[in-house]
Amino acid sequence: QVQLVQSGAEVKKPGSSVKVSCKASGGTFSSDTISWVRQAPGQGLEWMGRIIPILGMPNYAQKFQGRVTITADKSTSTAYMELSSLRSEDTAVYYCARKLTGDPYWYFDLWGRGTLVTVSS
Amino acid sequence: QTVVTQEPSFSVSPGGTVTLTCGLSSGSVSTDYYPSWYHQTPGQAPRTLIYNTDTRSSGVPDRFSGSILGNKAALTITGAQADDESAYYCVLYMGSGMAFGGGTKLTVL
C-alpha cells in the first residue's frame, strides 16, 4: 500500500529557504497529482500548489506565487516543495497530499504525515 | 478572491445530529466543485471523510453523509460520538487549484 513519506523537521533562519520532500513508498505516483498543504500553529489548512510528476508542470496558489517552487522526480517518485524568503509566519506543518490519477473526482485520498518547518532567528 | 466559508465552531450532544456547511463568499457551491470533507485531530494529518459531494471514503461509517443544501455543501453527522470531536475541513475544486475552508471545530458535549 502506497504511503507518502515526508522528510524530517527543519529549523530555518528568516530570509532563507527550505525544501521539503515527499516520497511515495510502496508504489509510484508519477501520473498522480501531488499537492502541498500547510497548517500554521492553531490555524486551518491552506493549499499551496500542485504538480503532476509525469508532466512536471506545477501550478501555485496566488498567495505563494514567486516564493514557492514545486518539483518532482518521477524516477524516484519524490515530490519537493521549496519555499524561499522565509519569515516567521511560514512556521507551519507542511503536508503533501495525493489526488489519484484516473479518478475523475478532485479530492485528496492520501496524505503524508507532515513536516514541521520552524522559522526562527 | 472567492473565499470558502465554514462555521468556525459547532457543538453537538452525544447521539445528536449536526450539519456543517461549506459555502462561497461569492456564488453557490455545486457538485461541479467536487466538495470533499476531511477531519483532523490535533497532531495528526487530515483524514478523508467524503468526496465528490456525497461519497464516503473507504472505512468511513455511514453516520457521516455529504450533500448539497441550498447553495452550500454540507456534512451531516448523525449519532455523534465523543470521537467525532475534531476539526472538519471542506475543500472545493476551483479549476486552477483547490481551496480549503477555514475549518469547523466540532465539540461533542
Image (spheres, rainbow, N blue to C red):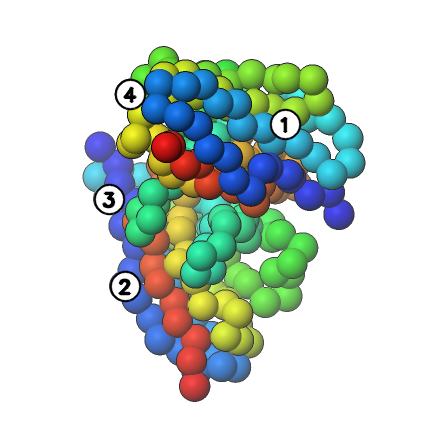
Q: Label 3 is placed on what type of residue?
A: Ser
Label 4 secondary element: loop
Q: Which residue is mark 3?
A: A25
State the residue at coordinates (70%, 35%): B24
Question: To which residue does mark 4 refer?
Answer: B59
Looking at the rendered structure, the secondary structure element under dot 1 is helix
Q: Amino acid under label 1?
A: Tyr
- Residue A94 picture location, percent across and down: 41, 57
Residue A8, numbered label: 2
Q: Are marks 4 and 2 in contact (CB under 8 Å)?
A: no
Mark closest to the chain's N terminus, 4 or 1? 1
- Are both tags, 4 and 1, on one chain? yes
Give the residue pinned by disc 1: B33
| Disc 3 to disc 4, C-alpha distance | 22 Å
Residue A1 percent coordinates (x, y): 22, 32
| Nearer mark to the viewer, of 4 and 2 | 4
User: Which quadrant of the view contains residue B92?
Assistant: top right
Residue placed most toward the observer, A16 or B36: B36
Q: Answer yes or no: are tags 3 and 4 on the same subunit.
A: no
Q: Earlier in the sequence, mark 2 or mark 3?
A: 2
Residue at point 56% right, 23% down?
B74
Nearest to the observer: residue A54 or residue A82: A82
Q: CA distance from mark 4 to mark 1?
A: 24 Å
- Classify residue B87 by image quadrant: top left
